[in-house]
Image (cartoon, rainbow, N blue to C red):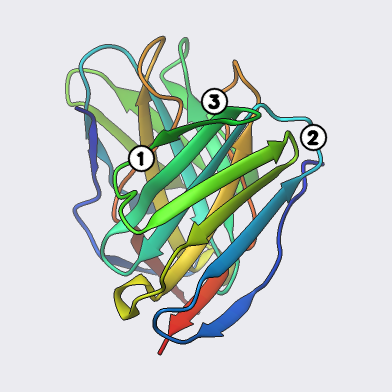
Amino acid sequence: DVKVTQSSRYLVKRTGEKVFLECVQDMDHENMFWYRQDPGLGLRLIYFSYDVKMKEKGDIPEGYSVSREKKERFSLILESASTNQTSMYLCASSFQDQETQYFGPGTRLLVL
Amino acid sequence: AQSVAQPEDQVNVAEGNPLTVKCTYSVSGNPYLFWYVQYPNRGLQFLLKYITGDNLVKGSYGFEAEFNKSQTSFHLKKPSALVSDSALYFCAVRVLGRGRRALTFGSGTRLQVQP
């Protein structure tokens, strides 16, 4: 079975802090994604990566950056956390030529 | 641009009755269509997908979905609902063969199955 893990289930941070969310997949997937989930808005794509050190902006990249130094790991960075970044963050991965994405359990981030 | 609409925020159904969760899409080209389910405090789980072929797609937990190209719809169905089906359901789309590999998701429909 595909396993996607996220470093934390719950996080509480202060405004202005730098926040790191980590995602690891164990199936040698080329593609990895970061989404945020907000009530009534569904999932919105922040960034995705199709290979090591490669990344592309999604629909809402402002205030975020990403890092992919190894194939299995994709990190989301909030450079200076703000209260409007309070949300559920979901990581996903997929094989290059396949469409099904596999999701991690999510990180619920609260920025005070 | 591609988009997905889930017109119902919530669907209520009695256990044992058939259920339908609606999804319509808008893409330029041939779509890949997906349904995912999310249980409380969990990530999304894949239910089923349509790529090509038979318009009726069968998935996990007894769910199925019908691709209707003329109506641009991909409604999720189950003949007999269970209380344990209560969850948040997301429809998603991407265009076949081009564009980014990420999916575009609908806003989600909460399914409530009453005992």
Report the residue marked by disc 2: A27
On the picture, is A7 further left or further right than B66?
right
Please tell me how crowded label 2 is: few (under 14), some (14-19), or many (20+) other residues with Cα within 10 Å: some
Question: How many numbered dots are placed on residues in this image?
Answer: 3
Question: Which chain is home to disc 2?
Answer: A
Q: Are labels 1 and 2 on one chain?
A: yes
Element at label 1: loop
Q: Which mark is residue B62?
A: none
Residue A40, horizontal then vertical, whole percent = 26, 65
Report the residue marked by disc 3: A99
Kindly report the distance in space between the C-alpha atoms of the residues bearing marks 1 and 2.
23 Å
In the depicted structure, whether residue A99 falls above or below residue B86: above
In the depicted structure, whether residue A64 falls above or below residue B14: above
Question: Which chain is home to disc 3?
Answer: A
Give the mark nearer the N terminus: 1 vs 2: 2
* Mark 2–mark 3 CB contact (< 8 Å): no
Give the mark nearer the N terminus: 1 vs 3: 1
**Residue at point 77%, 41% (across, down):** A2
Kindly report the distance in space between the C-alpha atoms of the residues bearing marks 1 and 3.
17 Å
Residue A18, horizontal then vertical, whole percent = 51, 71
Q: Which mark is residue A58?
A: 1
Camera-near label (1 vs 2) is 1
Q: Which of the pair A74/A25 is nearer the observer?
A: A74
Residue B26, horizontal then vertical, whole percent = 19, 28
Element at label 3: loop
Question: Which chain is home to disc 1?
Answer: A
**Residue at point 60%, 62% (across, down):** A21
Q: Are labels 2 and 3 on one chain?
A: yes
Give the mark nearer the N terminus: 2 vs 3: 2
